[in-house]
Image (spheres, grey):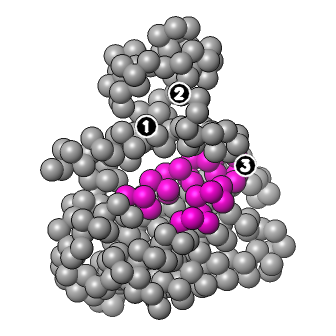
Amino acid sequence: MTGIIFIFGLIVGSFLNVCIYRLPRNMSIIRPSSACPSCNTPIKPWDNIPVLSYIFLKGECRKCGERISIRYPLVELLNGIFYLAVFRFFGMGQNSEFALPFLFAFASAMIVITLIDLDFQVIPDVITLPGIIIGLFSSSFLLPDPFSLQSSALSLPVVGFKNSIIGLLLGGGLFYLIAVLSRGGMGGGDIKMMAMVGAFMGWKAVFLTTFIGSLTGSIVGISLMVFKGKGRKTKIPFGPFLALGSVITLFFGGEIIRWYFTL
């Protein structure tokens, strides 16, 4: 079963590459079919097999020979790994057969948000706004609470509607307040993204995701200033760090809380 989940993750990862390229360019993610970005030649199905086609083609377009970015197979691999991790963590829990698709979607959304924000400094509403609604619905009935102090992921209670709606309002409200106080230092995409995170995982996830995102963002920002000579006013997108924080929270939120209580 794990092999099937991994392959499914790779296939979805190929679609994520389409979303990452087309969404910020306001292009349809359905039509036309995938094509080489250099020569615009449609990609044949046998040249569009996740990871394997990149290896067989030696990272080059069959038609024009232009190099294909290593990002494409890495996105596919990362999504496959995420799906496998979600299945191993939550696949044997209560109502897991219904919860897994929503957890898969959340993990994939974090990948798409990260790369689009890195490239364009924008987080598309087409991901976050439906994500808020989907998160609110699925967490009310299906999604496991990553902050439950129970020792087994097999019996985790659901996040619940109350926890989810508070998380939604807290995530969006907190980051809106930061945006107001910092006079534009926080983008609208970050606000809606954190509302989505809160809707999926509850109010505790908002705090932990923000903490991890701020910590890792600060480390990267300071490193860039020290080793790359970047100035303090250099803009660094915050979405990727929030995405990292949300994924860590999803898998290890309960463990982090238990560790904190033992200090």
Residue 116 picture location, percent across and down: 61, 47
Please, is residue 182 above or below residue 85 in the view?
below
The part of the image, by quadrant, that contains residue 66 is top right
Residue drawn 37% across and 64% down? 103
Q: Residue at 36% x, 81% y: name it.
A: 141
Near mark 2 (Cα within 10 A), the count class, few <14, some 14-19 or many ≥20, is some
State the residue position of label 1: 14
Q: Which amino acid does label 1 sit on?
A: Ser
Residue 55 visible in the displayed image: yes
Q: Would residue 228 be visible to someone looking at this image?
A: no
Q: Which quarter of the rendering shows the C terminus? A: bottom left
Between 5 and 214, the one nearer to me in the picture: 5
Mark 3 or 2 closer to N-term? 2
Quarter location, residue 128:
bottom right
Nearer the observer, disc 1 or disc 3? 1
> Marks 1/3: CA distance?
34 Å
- The magenta stretch is 104-131
- Label 2 near label 3: C-beta < 8 Å? no
Report the residue marked by disc 3: 230
* Magenta stretch prevailing secondary structure: helix
